[in-house]
Image: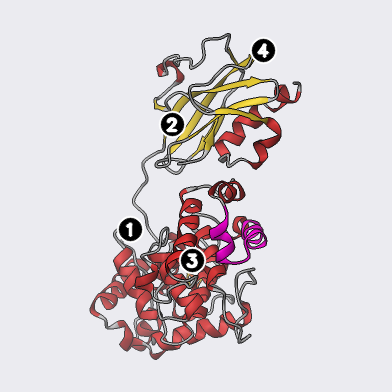
Amino acid sequence: MVEFWAEKRKIPSLDSAIKSYIVRLFNITGLMDNISPSHDPAELSDTLLDWYDENARQLPWRIRPGSGERPDPYAIWLSEIMLQQTTVVTVIPYFEKFIQLWPTIGDLASAELDQILSAWAGLGYYARARNLHKCARYIVGELNGNFPDREQELLRLPGVGPYTAAAIAAIAFGQKATVMDGNIERVMARMFNVTTPLPEARPELKAWAERMTPDHRAGDYAQAVMDLGADICGAKILKCSGRCPWEDNCQGNTLGTADQLPRRKSKMAKLTRRGYAFWAEYQGHLWLCRRPESGLLGGMMEVPSSEWLETDSWDEVPMPQIPIIANWKETPGMVRHSFTHFHLELKVIRLELLEMIELQEGGWFPFSRIENLALPTVMMKIIDHLKEPVLDL
Ligand code: SF4
């Protein structure tokens, strides 16, 4: 667009910094719309919808554009909750498993929380699974099994934040709603050359996204931007040339800044927490406890452990207070896992009991049942770490 503007005014070439400045100036003053008629938001959204009609990803919860079928709000809600913080590829088998186990919201509401947590195991962020159950029971108990169709009402449901509410309103009910996530922020930052770093850039990006949201085909448009961000305007791979429907209108593409956008404030390095896991077994049974309902991995079963302390090295980790007085042995190596905000290192100390003892907390679980328990990934890593000795029993 700037090239077009420069050409019109007989400016032979502009270096990228000057171009960027001019574009920002036009963006701020709202003059950009006067430069090129092809920048009309309605035209751009129609271009994207045409592209979507030809290129929509086939996903198990999605209705093909133009099929005339109505999306199932339960499937859309379930998929959107699963997609929070998780990739489409990871979600697909979980979605299919859930739909097979619980085909309707009524079925999901009737399930026990442990069954849901168990089916969820491996997807991470387990608060989502607990909220899924809470929300299903609320919709069945209080709303007669019907999802609300407005963004504001959807926002009141457990586990439904602004992104999910907008996605359900648009995709399941065709309401005009602007969906914002990392993919869409990236597309908007590039399309409008927004150089303010994230997170400060968010209001500006949202304003652009709202401006681009059309009055018609709200669900298809939301999914089209999602697909564009996922497949064409990727975080690492950009397929601008010949593949992107907005190629000719994209400021980031014109200015050559797209691959540097969106900008982010430099992140603090993740800290490491360290502790000891207590692996106690008795004749094919393992000692497991349930974590408190609130907080990290809330309500999940765990191999008990000492406090996870933030330290620079193992030298700073004190020997743990042993929960059962007996002959514990430290196993070689350690278990490593990364959470969103920290890395975790666990050394595992092991106890093989010859006699059953009464436990202050938790219980003895047969190894044959472990697969059916809601054990989070980090706990499965501990089990894998000790798999060979366990099989020897
Ligand atoms: S032209 Fe390139 S940078 Fe711009 S929206 Fe398309 S893929 Fe993204």
Q: Secondary structure at mark 1?
A: loop
Disc 1 to disc 2, C-alpha distance: 27 Å
Q: Does the segment drawn in magenta span residue 357?
A: no
Give the residue at mark 2: 272
State the image coordinates of residue 21 (x, y, percent, origin top left): 29, 70
Q: Is residue 324 left or right of residue 204?
A: right
Question: Disc 2 residue type?
Answer: Thr
Sequence-first disc among 4 and 1: 1
Disc 1 to disc 3, C-alpha distance: 43 Å
Q: Is disc 3 surrounded by few (<14), some (14 to 19) or many (20+) residues within 10 Å?
A: some
- Disc number lying in front (4 or 3): 3
Q: Secondary structure at mark 2?
A: strand
Give the residue at mark 1: 197
User: From what the image shows, is residue 379 above or below residue 238?
Assistant: above
Instruction: Say which mark, if any, is on residue 140.
Output: 3
State the image coordinates of residue 234 (x, y, percent, origin top left): 53, 63
- Does the CB distance between marks 4 and 3 fall below 8 Å? no
Quick one: which residue is furthest to the bottom in this view?
37
Mark 1 near ligand 1 (CB under 8 Å)?
no
Question: Disc 1 residue type?
Answer: Pro
Give the residue at mark 4: 354
Sequence-first disc among 2 and 3: 3
Sequence-first disc among 2 and 4: 2
Disc 2 to disc 3, C-alpha distance: 42 Å
- Disc number lying in front (2 or 4): 4
